[in-house]
Image: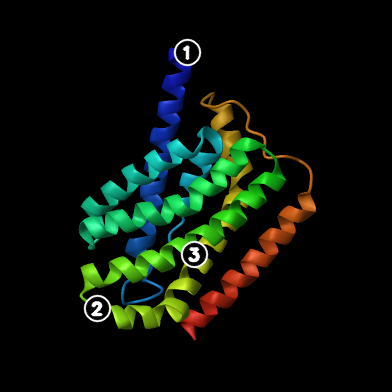
Amino acid sequence: MTNSKTKKLTTLGMLCAMAYTVTVIFTSAIPPIVTFPPLYFDPKDVVILLGGFLFGPLSALAISAIVSFFEMLSVSTTGWWGLLMNIVSSCSFVIPASFIYQKRKTLTAAILGLSVGIITVVTVMTLWNYIVVPYYTGFPREAVAAMLLPVFVPFNLFKAGLNSVIALVMFKPIVTALHKSDLIEPAIIGKRSTKAKWIFIIVMTYIAAVLLSYFIF
C-alpha cells in the first residue's frame, strides 16, 4: 500500500513538473493569440487530463492548483485573479472528462468525456470572463460582454479542442513510458471504435485550424 502511494505521488509530481514546464515554454516563447486581455495557448491541460484519466478528478484538481500557483509566482502577470481563472479553466475542462472516463475506461468514454469537457469549459469560461475580467483589467463590463462571442468563445473552443486532440494522440505513449518505469499499472483507453477516435481528431483539428486562422487573419 505504501509503495503504491509513493508511486502515485511520484507520478503526480512528475505530471506537475511536466505541466509547469510546458506552460513556461509556451508562454515565454510564443506570443499570446489574443493581446488584450492576453490569452495564451499552452498544452498543460493535456498533462492535467492525463493525471485525471489515470487517478481521477481529484488528482486533476490537485495538479491544476499546484501548477497554477507556481505559474502565478513565475510567469503570470495577473496575480490571484489569474490563479483563479487558470484553475477554473483547467478544471472545467479536465474534471468532467476524467469523471466520465473513470466510469468506464474505454475510447468511447474518453471521446465523450472530452466532448463534454469542451462544452463545459466554453460555457464556464464565457461566464467567468464576463464576471472576472473587468475586476483585474479595469476594462468596462460592456466592452468585455462585446468580446465574449468574437473572442473568448472561439479561443476557449480552439484551446480545448486542440488539447483534446493532443491528449488522444499522446495518451498511449506517455502511459506506456510511465508503465515501463514501473510507476503505474497499464491504463486502458479501449481498442474499439478506433475510427471514432480519428474522426474526432480530424474534426477537432479542423475546427482548431479554422479558429486559429480567424485570430490570425
Residue furthest top in the image: 1
Q: CA distance from mark 3 to mark 1?
A: 39 Å
Q: CA distance from mark 2 to mark 1?
A: 52 Å
Going by the numbered disc 1, the residue's amino acid type is: Met
Which label's residue is closer to the chain start, 2 or 3? Answer: 3
Q: Of the numbered discs in the image, which one, if any, rests on residue 1?
A: 1
Instruction: From the top left corner, tell me how far across and down residue 130 is, in percent.
Output: 35, 71
Q: CA distance from mark 2 to mark 3?
A: 21 Å
Going by the numbered disc 2, the residue's amino acid type is: Phe
Going by the numbered disc 3, the residue's amino acid type is: Val
Reading the image, the residue beneath label 2 is 139
Marks 3/1 in contact by CB < 8 Å: the verdict is no
| Above/below status of 130 relative to 110 | below
Q: How many marks?
A: 3
| Above/below status of 73 relative to 177 | below
Front in this rendered view, residue 170 or 164: 164
Instruction: From the top left corner, tell me how far across and down residue 50 is, in percent.
Output: 52, 42
Picture residue at 59% right of the left edge, 25% below the top: 185
Instruction: From the top left corner, tell me how far across and down residue 171 is, in percent.
Output: 60, 44
Q: Quadrant of residue 116?
A: bottom right
Q: Quadrant of residue 77?
A: bottom left
Picture residue at 67% right of the left edge, 60% below the top: 201
Instruction: From the top left corner, tell me how far across and down residue 111 is, in percent.
Output: 66, 51
Which label's residue is closer to the chain start, 3 or 1? Answer: 1
Could you say whether the residue bearing mark 2 is in a helix, strand or loop? Answer: loop
Reading the image, the residue beneath label 3 is 122
Which label's residue is closer to the chain start, 2 or 1? Answer: 1
